[in-house]
Structures are given as structure tokens and as C-alpha cells.
Image (tube, rainbow, N blue to C red):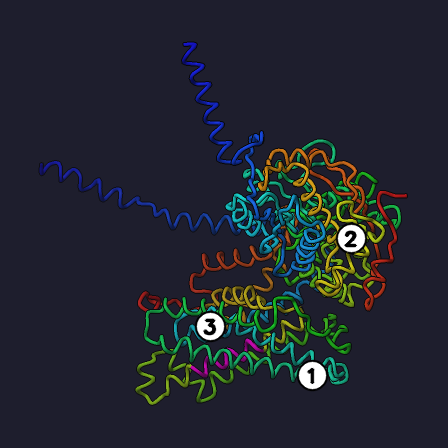
Amino acid sequence: MKTKRSMRFIAALGALALVAAACGGGGTDFVEGELGSVTVDAGEAIQIRSLNAISGEVAFLGVPNENAVRLAVADFGPIEGHEVNVGTGLDDLCSAEGGQQAAQNIVADTDVVGVIGTSCSGAAAAAAPVISEAGLVMISPSNTSPGLTSDLEGTAGENYYEGYYRTAHNDLFQGQGAANFVFNNLQLTKVGLIHDGDPYTNGLTTAFENAFEELGGEIVIHTAVTVGQTDMVPVLTEVAAAGPELIFMPIFPAEATFIVQQIGGVSGLEDIVLMGADGISVENFMNLPESEGMYFSGPDTRFAENTNESTDINGAEFLTEYDAEFGGAPSADFWGHAYDATTLLLKAIQTVAVVDGDVLHIDRLALREELNKTSGYEGLIGSITCDEFGDCGAAVISIFQHINLADHQASKANILYTYPEG
Amino acid sequence: MFAGVSTAAPEVAKTRRFKFNWVDGFLWFIRVAAIITIVVGITGSIQKFAGGGGPSVEAWRDLIISSISTGSMYGLIALGYSMVYGVLGFINFAHGEVFMSGTMVGLISATILFNNGFWDSNPYVSILLVLIVAMITSMLVAVVVERVAYRPLRGAPRLIPLITSIGVSFFIQYAFAGLFGVAIRNYPPAPASLARDFDILGIPVEGTKLLVISVAVLSMIGLWYFVTKTKTGSAMRAVAEDKEIAGLMGIDVDKTIVTTFAVGGAMAGVAGLLWALLFRGVDFLTGFLPGIKAFTAAVLGGIGNLPGAMLGGVLLGLFEGVGPLLVLDGLGIPAVSQLKDAVAFAALVLVLIFRPSGLLGERLGSEERA
């Protein structure tokens, strides 16, 4: 018996040595964790991916995310002599199908270490399980649905998977900010909510509902439109019947456009106050004359003075760099989040990478543990600390009123309220 | 042995006498259930209304007017489906895209007119110009599609042009996506003189909706006159009746079919302008849902029947606009407006259960239906 056991032990040791020899080619004591590891050979690049909504109606959100990822990779520079390769930008199509399909493409390539994405919460809910299962990490710059992380009180969301992180705020937070503004600053007590069935929009209206009712306000109706719907008169009639003073509709531009254009033809909504969120505080929607006077909540993007500790670039410099590289200003508000998400990932890779001559070992489990430990990382968006469910946002919510059709930046600077207050 | 047979025979007769047809029974069950659901829903809504809840009288009025205007647009598109079905016996699924091409090209002319100020100074002339552009575009697209995609398939089994039409539909969609981009583009706002309310029999009606309904009614009357009173119209009806015999009687069948596509396309072009007046925003997928809805409307009214298509359109508009609030809300279902499309298609199923040939359709013999 005894000899047999020791024989087995020796055999196991031999096998381990073989594996180590195969992986490393000699010399180091790198032992891979239970999620496996990635070995970057001499002269090869470290593979990460960008998965954002870069086509279709929501491209305004994903394109600046991907651009910011590329700028961050260029600014960060090589890691231990290995270049970082983002590859072709992948498209989450802002849908569950798109997210899942792209995620499967990503995990099919076993050299990929991490993903920056998705843009849309709906896509993340389908992509996160695939990415998590394969042992990768994903950091989203613009997912805000509470279901993807936690309720901020210690309960994991229904779509939380290990290895998921985000630098965007949790919408529970935005819901609280928006509700406080409506109740305390606008002093309105009856609100109607419209979402479009997407986890982002539904998550935000629900967060608003809970926060607003806690303050003592009343949600008179909580209804939905469908994506692609054009005739909004029925839904507006339904809303008008409930008699709200304000409609909060954190949806996307296509449907929001039809709503603001048709609202004039519905009796009972003549004096309604309209409020949207970061999904529609974008150029093509803000160009509509009907959007003037609306309130918008979203992440505070006054990042000019904040400096990213890994690249020494501040917000103002980033925007100059962005304009030089891609022309114009980013079309949505999450460029800083995308930039920080990328440097956060690269810095974590740099920390856990084991150098073995010209070869680099990156352990997947160690990478997750490193990201979990993130605390006080200085990024463009402020000081970033990750909680145990992957919420890493340095959340400040601001609310502005659209007062200048010709100059959107002037409108966006017209900030009436920031949350947390003070 | 013989005894066995003789005793078995009456048994068979007995079971036959009491044989219950499950399919008929199921259909009756659905009919009764549908009626009960609708009655309960409407009663619920009326009770809510009587109790001071639900939409106000003004809101119901606006909703009904807006539903009728959307419905008359569906009706105009449905005419194209119905006419082609009447003449060729297949569903031209690319018809939604014929409609879309009209509004997309109309948008270019509307933008030009808006930018040089003509849109505001001469609103009605501008709308007429855009209407002409949209009609000509849709007509051309329909005729070209017929010539390129359907004529070579004349005589092929009906499924083949049907599948082809789906291919054509994708082709037109993505051709427009390539030409115009994928973003939603907006028509200029309706001129101020149209944006006010007009008084019709004491009911205030929004100008654009009034225009939409009147344009639809006028087009329908024009089409009806064309089909019933003119020589070309008679030729169309003759071809619809029997292509071969019509050919023997000296009618140019190909030319008549082209005319049918052209007229159907022109109606879709009119609908394109109405869409622009109602919703303003257009993109390359604009034709998809209205196309499906108009097809539904054509079946609802009885496919192949022109007044049926128009009636089907208006009814479908009413069902999907008013139905969710009138029936589903009364049943206590939350966020009913989201179910607008579901209600529209459920209405089709219900109408077909009660009248399989559609509202104004004639009952077809099994030979004709095949």
C-alpha cells in the first residue's frame, strides 16, 4: 500500500513537472489557479477585447466607448514588453442575442484575458454568464442595471456573475438622485414612469419608483413602450389618464423622439414636465426642438481636473486626444468610464503577470482577485473602489436642464443638482 | 364470426351518431371565451370610467381619432397587398418596403423644401410636391420589382414568388440602409396652419390627422372609380378573374399586371406621406411593421377585396389603438400599451375564427383557395 501511494505521488509530481515544462519552458514556479491561465509567448501581444454597441440606433453609446478603450491601450503602453491588442471591435448590438453571440466568439479564443463591455445592460445579462464561465473578466463602462451587480445592500442581482465589474454607476443610485431632485427641487409628487422592457430602462424606472415612494411621492403609473414602436398616442393616453405632473422616461432616442413629438396631440398632457436619463441626453435627441426644457439625469462628466493614475492623462487632455484621433467630442457620457475600465484591467494584468524570460503568464483567478481588491484607484471618473459584486463606479449623478438647442455643451453645463448632495 | 360482425355494426353506428368533433368544439370554446373576455374587459373599463378613473372623454376622443388616422394609413398600404393578391394570387411581402422607399425619398424633397423656406411659406403646395415625389418613387419601385423579380417567375408555383418577395424586401431595406444610413431621420414639423385643431361637427380634430383621414378617403374613392369605371380597371378585374381567358379576350395581361403594381405602389406612396405627417421619423426599417400590419388589415377585411382592405385597415388601427385601454385595462393588466401589437394580431385571429374569409371576403371554393 505504502509503496503504491508513494508511486502515485511520484507519478503526479512527474505529470505536474511535465505540465509546467509544457507551459513555461523552464525555470519558474508559476502555478496556475483553478480558472486556468493565459500564456503570452515571446513577441506576442496580450489579447483583450472591446464589446460595445457600435452599430444601429445605439451606436452613439458604444462607439465612444470603443474609441476610449483604444486610446487607453495606446496611453498605457506595453506590459512587460508585450503589446496589448484589442483586435477588431466587437458589437453587442445592444441586445441579448448580440451580447451572447459576441461573448461566445470571445471565449472561443483562449488567449483573451479580459473584455471591456458591454455597452447595454441587456447585452451584458446574456454575455456575462458566458464570459464568467470561461474564467475571463469583463469590465463594463456603461451598464447601469442593478440586476448585474447588487442591490447595494449585500444581495447579488439576478444577473450577477463572478468576473463581472463595471465602472458605470449602479442605477439604484441614479434612481435615488433623480427621485430626490423631482421631489425636493421640482417639488412634484405625482410621477409617471415609462420604460421599454430593457433591463437598463426597467431597472432605472424601478429604482426611481422605490426611491420616490420612500420620499413620500406617488407613482401614478408605471408603463412601457416596445422597442421600435412609433405610435405613442395609446401609451400617452394611458399615462394622461393617471394624471402625473412629470414623466420620467429613461429610454432610448428612437422611442423618446416619437413620444415628445406626439405628446402635444394628447389631452391632459399639456403642462407635463418631461425628464429623461443618460440614454437620451445625446446629440440627435437634443437636436429636437421638442426636447428643449427637458430635464436629464446622468453621470456627472466634469472630469477635466481628474487624472488617471496609470497614464497621467486628465479629462481635458483626454478630450483633446479624442478630438485629434476621432474628430469631435464623444457622443455619449461614458468615455471616462471606458478609459478607466481599460486602464484598470491593464494595471491588474500588469500586477498579476508572472514574467518568465520572454514569456508572460497571466492567471485568471489572480486577475479576478486583483480587481476585487481595487481600492482608491484614481481614474478620470474619480476615486474607484470595487465592492464585492463588481460595482466600481465613482458615482456622482448630475441633473441638467436642456436650455440651449444650438449649444448642447451649454445645456449640459446647466447642472441644477448633483447627487450625493453637497 | 358473422355474429360478431352483426353485433359490431350497430356499435359503430352508435359511436358515429354521438361523435363529437373536437376541432369544432375547441373553436366554439375559443369563440365563447373571446366574447366573455372582451365583454368583461369592456365592462371593467366602463366601471372604471364611471368611477372617475381611466382616460377622460377628451383623451378617448383623441385616441379614437388618432387610431382612425393610423388605420387609414394601414388601409392604403393594404390596398397594394389586396390588389396584387387579387391579380396574381400571392402575397407581395416587399410591399412594406415599397411604402418605405416612398417616405424615404419624400424626406429628401421635404428637407430641401424646408431648408429653402418653401415648406413654411407654401405648406400645402409643399405637401403636394412631397406627395407626388413619394407616389412616383413607390410606383417606380413597385414596377421595377415586378419586372425584375416577379415577371420571370410568372407561372411558377405560388410559394416561389412569395419567398422571392421576402428576398426583395431585404434587398430594398438594406439598399436604403446603404444609401441613407441607419439613423432615424425626421421630416420637418407640420406647418403651423396644420398643427392647430379644426372643428368637425363640434369635435376638435387635429389638422394633420384630419388631412391624413381625408387624403386616405379621397385616394380610396379615386381608386374605386379607377377600378370599377375605367377600361384599365375592367381589364384588371378581368385578369383577376382568369388570366388566360382575359388574354384570349385581347387584354394585355402583362401590361395590366404592371398597372396593378403601379397603382398599388402609388397608394403605398400616399401612405408614405401620411406616415411622415403622423410620425415624422423614418429609417430603413420603417416599412417592416406597417407592412405586416397592412397585410393583417388586408386579411382582416378579406384579401382581394378593395373596400375590405380599407375597412380592415381602419378597424385594425382602432383595435390596436383603443383595444389595449378598452379591453385589457378593464381586465386589470398593467402596462397595457406595450401589448398594442399583440392586440392587433389577436384581433386578426379572432376575426378569422368568426369569419374565416375576412370581413368582406367571399367564401372561396377549395379549388380557388389551393
The residue tagged 1 is B126
Q: Give the number of the disc on residue A243.
A: 2
What residue lies at 46% left-to-right and 18% top-to-bottom?
A: A9
Residue A249 visible to the viewer: no
Label 1, residues with CA under 10 Å away: few <14, some 14-19, many ≥20: some
Q: Could you tell me which chain the residue with mark 1 belongs to?
A: B
- Image side of residue B33 versus residue A314, left or right: left
Q: Could you tell me the amino acid type at mark 1?
A: Ser
Point out residue B22 in the picture as x, y percentages from the top left corner. 36, 46
Q: How far apart are marks 3 and 2 (CA)?
A: 42 Å
Tell me the element at label 2.
Answer: loop
Q: In this picture, is B43 found above or below B256?
A: above
In the picture provided, is B349 more to the left or to the right than A189?
A: left
The percent position of residue A400, horizontal first and vertical second, equals: 84, 55
Which secondary structure lies at badge 1? helix
Residue at 13%, 36% in the rendered image: B4
Q: Which of A368 and B264 is in front in this view?
A: A368
Instruction: Give the percent coordinates (x, y) of residue B287.
Output: 56, 68
Magenta residues (range): B258-269
Please name the residue that numbered disc 3 is placed on.
B82
Instruction: Tell whether position B265 is magenta.
Output: yes
The N terminus of chain B, quarter of image? top left
Question: Subunit of mark 3?
Answer: B
Q: Which residue of the protein is positioned furthest toward the right in this rendering? A: A422
Badges 2 and 1, same chain: no
In screen coordinates, is A316 left or right of A79? right
Q: Which of A273 and A359 is in front in this view?
A: A359
